[in-house]
Amino acid sequence: MKILRDQRISDLYYILAVISYVSTLFVNGMRPGVFGAALMVLVLAELAVRKELRPKAMADYIATAFFAYQILSVIWLVRGGFPLSVYINEFVSSCFPMIFYFVGRSAGLRSAKWYRNYLYAMLVLGVLGVAMYVIAPGFYIDWAYRWIYISKADAATMRVRMHSVVGSTCLSFLMVAGMMAGSYFLGEHAGNVLSQDPTSNGDGRGRKHDIVFAAVTIGACLLFAIMANQRSGLVAAALVLVYVNYLIFFKLDMIPRKFFWYEVIAVAAVFVAIGTVKFEFLLKFWYRIISLPTAISQRSEQWVAAVNNMYSSWIGNGLGANGHRAIGIEDAHVIADGGLVKLYCENGVIGFSLFAYLLFLVLSDGIKNIRKHYVEVGIIVVGLLQSIGSNMLAFQICAPIFWFAIGRCGDQVE
């Protein structure tokens, strides 16, 4: 009970959100988007009561201005002929999660608890996803078809990608972000712990079980990201492995380098074993990775068309105008199947500049303090990378950790 009393609603967000998604398997009327919005209302109230919504630094004011700009965009969205429902649905999915900027901004030493709960939620998503992928029960196949995660209600189609209960696109990003969250527990004092030094910095890092927890969660999230079989996710997962290993073992010297070679040997052994038993399994993912340039070229014409059909290049089309929620609306703008292009088309030069300047501020500070913020820098870059071809930041389940990372990464930007 003490553990529950120590938790904030914001700490428990991902655990509760994942529970709501899992419940859709059994409760037909469950709407995880509505449940998530209700949770965020509670998080907002919690921040207000604790007086953690007050802007204190330049990044806070820019983030607040960007949030306000997206709220105001309802004016020109409605004038452009879109129903208010498009705005509301987009707001609760992509704009409202910005409150997690202030959760991250005020997290401090509580970041360990937030990341740990996030990883618990990801393990639930991943283990459930693997179970459904392997067993392929009829009710799950019907459920996936009803939620339009698969185009045919059969096991073969369902097994092309692992969807769990959030869809392969969201699952891919969440698990790659999970790899970064897991690396948090390899923190600054990990090397001392492995040397039998009990030193701890008091925020949950620096204990032996945290090192084990990090290794297990990073490995599990990597496996789940691979099984999601999204091209951008596969590339991002590989980049995260390189990034984390370089920083932990070489740049920051957090862990003795001999453990790096143990890791290389273990990974090589796994690949050899898989290749020996089922080589076509490796080829399946290799072909997905090398097809990434094709996916970008396929979308580029759509991106150009979306930009050329903007209501106003300065103020944009309004929140939701270029998202999938606008499909089927008469005279709707071109749907931008790419989060960054979508963000530009909807927010125009003014809104996009606010977003870009905010990222410049926090990433500049994060890179200067890379030892403290290597996790957040990684999550932000992964989010931007995967948003090139997918509307990643428009998913309610994905956006909170992205904005949490921005807030935490900018907690020293004055």
Image (spheres, rainbow, N blue to C red):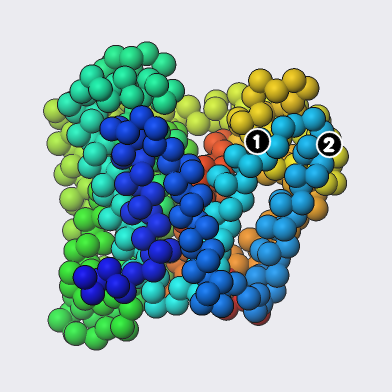
Residue 220 visible to an observer of this rendering = yes
Choose top left, top right, bottom left or bottom right for residue 413: bottom right
Residue 356 visible to an observer of this rendering = no
Residue nearer the viewer, 193 or 37: 37
Q: Secondary structure at mark 1?
A: helix
Q: How many marks?
A: 2
- Residue occupying image coordinates x 17% and y 26%: 135
Task: Give the left or right position of residue 312, taking residue 108 as reference.
Answer: right
Task: Give the left or right position of residue 131, taking residue 143 as reference.
Answer: left
Q: Report if the CB atoms under discs 2 and 1 are less than 8 Å apart.
A: no
Q: Give the x, y percent position of residue 323.
A: 64, 34
Task: Give the left or right position of residue 364, taking residue 316 as reference.
Answer: left
Task: Give the left or right position of residue 94, taking residue 224 as reference.
Answer: right
Choose top left, top right, bottom left or bottom right for residue 90: top right
Distance between mark 2 and mark 1 Cα atoms = 14 Å
Q: In the image, is residue 65 above or below residue 369?
A: above
What residue would you read off at disc 1? 85
Q: In the image, is residue 105 above or below residue 175?
A: below
**In the image, what residue type sits under mark 1?**
Ser
- Residue occupying image coordinates x 33% and y 14%: 153
- Residue occupying image coordinates x 41% and y 26%: 147
- Residue occupying image coordinates x 36% and y 40%: 21
Q: Earlier in the sequence, mark 2 or mark 1?
A: 2
Q: Give the x, y percent position of residue 406.
A: 55, 63
What residue would you read off at disc 2? 79
